[in-house]
Amino acid sequence: MNRKSLVSIADYSEEDILRLIGVAEIFEKNPNRKLLEGKVCATLFFEPSTRTRLSFETAVNRMGGRIIGFSDAATTSSSKGETLKDTIMMVSNYADLIIMRHHLEGAARYASEVTGVPIINAGDGANQHPTQTMLDIYSIYKTQGTLENLEITMVGDLKYGRTVHSLITGMSHFNPVFHFVAPDELKIPDLYKNFCDKKGIRYHEYTDFSEDVINRSDIIYMTRVQRERFTDLMEYEKVKNVYILRNSMLSNSKDNLRILHPLPRVNEIAYDVDSNPKAYYIEQAKNGVFARQAIICDVLGIE
Amino acid sequence: MVKKKELQVAALKNGTAIDHIPVGQLFKVVSLLGIEYLETPVTIGYNFDSKKMGKKGIIKISDKFFEQNEINRISLIAPTVNLNIIRDYEVVEKKQVSLPDEVSGIVKCNNPKCITNNEPMQTRFQVIDKENVTLRCHYCEVKIKKEDIELK
Ligand SMILES: [Zn+2]
């Protein structure tokens, strides 16, 4: 495997994360820097994701790079049965960088092993989406001025939510305290609790989304509770309105509290929260372009 | 003294005797070691009495000496096995199997959405817990416990 690829947030050390935050800050001050002039970047979206693709393509365009690729596997030869390996090797003849999203888990890791062209994983099934995690971490850093010693509350689907799992991994370097708020059916898997135990990270679990936990938090990371995740629909009906954040719940929260959400949201953040200065989810998405600019330069070895 | 029971099987002059194979795994061991492709004489013993195991399997292979990494291929299914290296009718060395740090190509990933189940490629797992035998897929990162391990 070429060492430059970014497949999983676990590929990044504490130093890597801090260095990338520094670079993202530079891009935030001036996003239009022609660092990719003469470079061709491929965006291979075997599974469609307009939001992520637009963010990456904006990042490339602001740096003066060219883009080739596809936004839906139905238009490619992989729909005719071509292997992933063949597609990646073919595109490697043309591109300096491959940004890929795939519905199969492990696809990006495998791609990084069959080509010398750096790969950025833009999501592989339920497994990893490391650029989302970098933008989450950058958002936390920007709003708190530090990554160290924060109280981070995660709410909603903590069982299947890959953004939650990756954020636990990414923040594990910085001595956080985690508060996990979820219904029984969607609570955080033992795997991640064991990970925290091993790393000496403190965490608490709750089924109630109470003001108590809100008032302790520096960051609240909301996720969607999706009906299709429940085996028991009665259970869904019972909990669907329990994990909703409303503006009235924030009246005694810390001044530095910020509310994050990987978006798109359904109903888990009431619209009356949007005008609260503690709501950060819209700006959070904007940070994605800067974080991705930093990551693209990093994998290409551009200082 | 050689026991009578052992004499029911041809004594080995030179080669490897693999003992204490769980009977249910015997033919998997045969296949993982590639014994069907050998051209030297092989004796396979099935349902032999064993004090330790009740029933056991044994394999005696003439003029074949395995590398440690070949032997380790069977560690996932038969961790209790021991191997006797025989030269001139004498046991000159005893070997145990041990779990390698990484397992390639033997195990199937049990995540149907894993790339390894959808692309013509080798599987690859890191052994993350040798004591309890837990594997992690190198690709999809799913963890597989001992009781869920499925061979290809
Ligand atoms: Zn797998």
Image (cartoon, coloured by chain):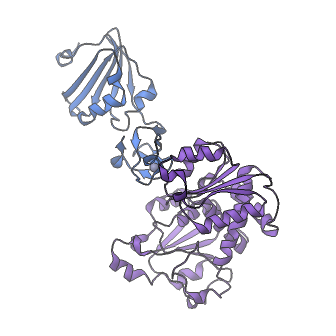
Residue A101 placement (x, y as % from top left): 57, 58
Chain coloured purple: which letter?
A
Q: Nearer the viewer, residue A214 or A238?
A: A238
Q: Which residue is drawn at 62% across and 85% down?
A: A253
Q: What shade does chain B have?
A: blue
On the rendered structure, is B9 left or right of A183?
left
Q: In this rendering, is residue A250 above or below B113?
A: below
On the rendered structure, is A254 left or right of B114?
right
The answer to whether residue A101 shows anywhere in this view is: yes
Location of the N terminus of chain A (image quadrant): top right
Residue B43 placement (x, y as % from top left): 25, 19
The answer to whether residue A175 shows anywhere in this view is: no
Q: In this rendering, is residue B46 above or below B129?
A: above
Q: Which of A280 and B51 is in front in this view?
A: A280
Q: Quadrant of residue A85?
A: top right
Q: Which residue is drawn at 59% across and 54% down?
A: A10
Residue A6 placement (x, y as % from top left): 63, 52
Q: In this rendering, is residue A208 above or below A292?
A: below
On the rendered structure, is B123 left or right of A85?
left
Q: In this rendering, is residue A186 above or below B67?
A: below
